[in-house]
Image (cartoon, coloured by chain):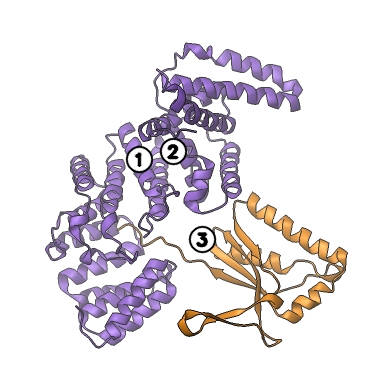
Chain colours: A purple, B orange
Amino acid sequence: MTPLDPAAGHLLRDLAPQVLGAVIRRYRDFSAAEDAVQEALFAAALQWPQQGIPENPRAWLIQVASRRMTDHIRAESARRRRETEVALDAAAQLAPPPDAAADPAEDDTLVLLFMCCHPALTPASAIALTLRAVGGLTTAEIARAFLVPEATMAQRISRAKAAIKSSGVPFSLPAAGERAQRLAAVLHVLYLVFNEGYVATAGTQVLRPDLSTEAIRLARALHRLLPQDAEVAGLLTLLLLTDSRRAARTGPGEELIPLDRQDRALWDRAAISEGIALLTAALSRGAAGPYQIQAAIAAVHAEAARAEETDWPQILALYELLLRMSDNPMVALNRAIAAAMVHGPAAGLALLDALDRDPRLAGHHRLPAVRAHLLEMLGDRVAAIRHYESAADLTLSLPERNYLITRAARLRSPTPNP
Amino acid sequence: MRYMLLMTGTCAGVDHYRAWSEKDIQAHFAYLQKLNRELTGSGEFVATAPLAPPQQALTVRAGKDGAPVTDGVFPESKEFLLGYWIVDVDCPERACAIAARLSAGPGPGGVPTNMPIEVRQVMTARTADLT
């Protein structure tokens, strides 16, 4: 089989949600339509390299998927004979002849995103279904991305579809009253997809689809559909700016390199310029939301040519703004770091003392890790070592654990820091 | 979150298990197969591996020039890993519930073996949150 060239592959995956939307509108069965579109995408991946990309690729895919739907309805009819005539009739009435291909060019990507990221689904289900139905990835690809067997991922996807069916979510945009909340759920799922791919491996897993890149692609599509939404732009910026540091954040042995020690020449300038331009436009539209503020913090880092030139008072002000919006202990931890950079480590440590009583941070490695950093800044080596080690015992991230034990070992060694 | 559920036992324990009746052994295997299917169905199954019996176990150390030096004589009381499951679950409680199901596998006469299952979280390659 000749593989599709990358441009055709992108085209196919960009068309996937539009095709799915068209098929759902005709046949009203999300679950079966989603399977049919996957089969059409597979057929395209097989046939297009040989026969060339059809003149109207979208209509081609809709036609193939519709044929699969008709086959599906016929197959179902073998089991449910009584219902078959009704279903075929309805399908025939709803569907214009496939060769007419006179589908409106409306884009159902947004409707699908709202559906797949519905709060009735668990985050794991929403992520899997979004990647398949909107991202156009196959079950096998998603399974590889999550390092689980294909059968397990197939079950997650079919359970997600069943949850959508039983919750009765209609195939339409959410009502005005719940729109903001539902959009927040969509943004959160894209953020989780990015995080899932945010691993400290230097491209050793070529077969594993890159979820961070996929999250950026989906966030771009969402931004194209909702160009006026400042939080969508904020999320896209946050992902672009975070991803821009990818080449600099790990060393040759895949060890983590903290922001202040990264080689900033390795940062992706094109992604940074794009992100900053997006953010500037978004911030001009009025009150900023949490993704824009996090993006603004990433932008302050991106704009510093050297770590020592970082505008920490600006970052501190942004964390304080973020903390007023949501009482998030992780934000409070980051604020303590910023306060230490502006007012000295004692000020940061004083803020941490207040967080010791927060049950949401109990047993979380970030609290001792931040405390260790600030104690190191203060020059209290013995206490810093102790907190680095307790953080190393608590983290579940292997690269982070290695980083923390290395940091503690460096402080224990009699030779001064290079 | 991923957990590895480890089933451990001694050589004596494995000998004991070999003395079960055919029916009891079959019931035990059927129980585990059903559980594996259930875990796939719930989207939680990642991997499992039964290990060859501990009587075949060897420990290896590097000798001179890194050549392997093997040792295969162990005290009767030594605990061996017999097999493991890796599951991808939403919460630690669910990992414990699956471990309890493994421990409840039927022994002779259908009485649960009540084997101890060690529950260990698997580390990830993911790193800190975005900002």
A354 lies above or below A47: below
What's the mark number on residue A135?
2
B99 or A185: nearer the viewer: B99
- The quadrant holding residue A404 is bottom left
Q: Residues within 10 Å of mark 2 (few under 14, many from 20)?
A: many
Amino acid at pointer 2: Gly
Amino acid at pointer 3: Met
Instruction: Tell me the residue that label 3 is attached to.
Output: B1
Contact between labelled residues 1 and 2, with CB atoms less than 8 Å apart:
yes
Q: Please, which chain is the residue tagged with disc 2 on?
A: A
Q: Are marks 3 and 2 on the same chain?
A: no
B120 or A204: nearer the viewer: A204
Q: Please, which chain is the residue tagged with disc 1 on?
A: A
Nearer-N-terminus badge (2/1): 2
Instruction: Tell me the residue that label 1 is attached to.
Output: A217
B12 or A302: nearer the viewer: B12
What's the mark number on residue B48?
none
Q: Horizontally, is A16 left or right of A275 in the view?
A: right
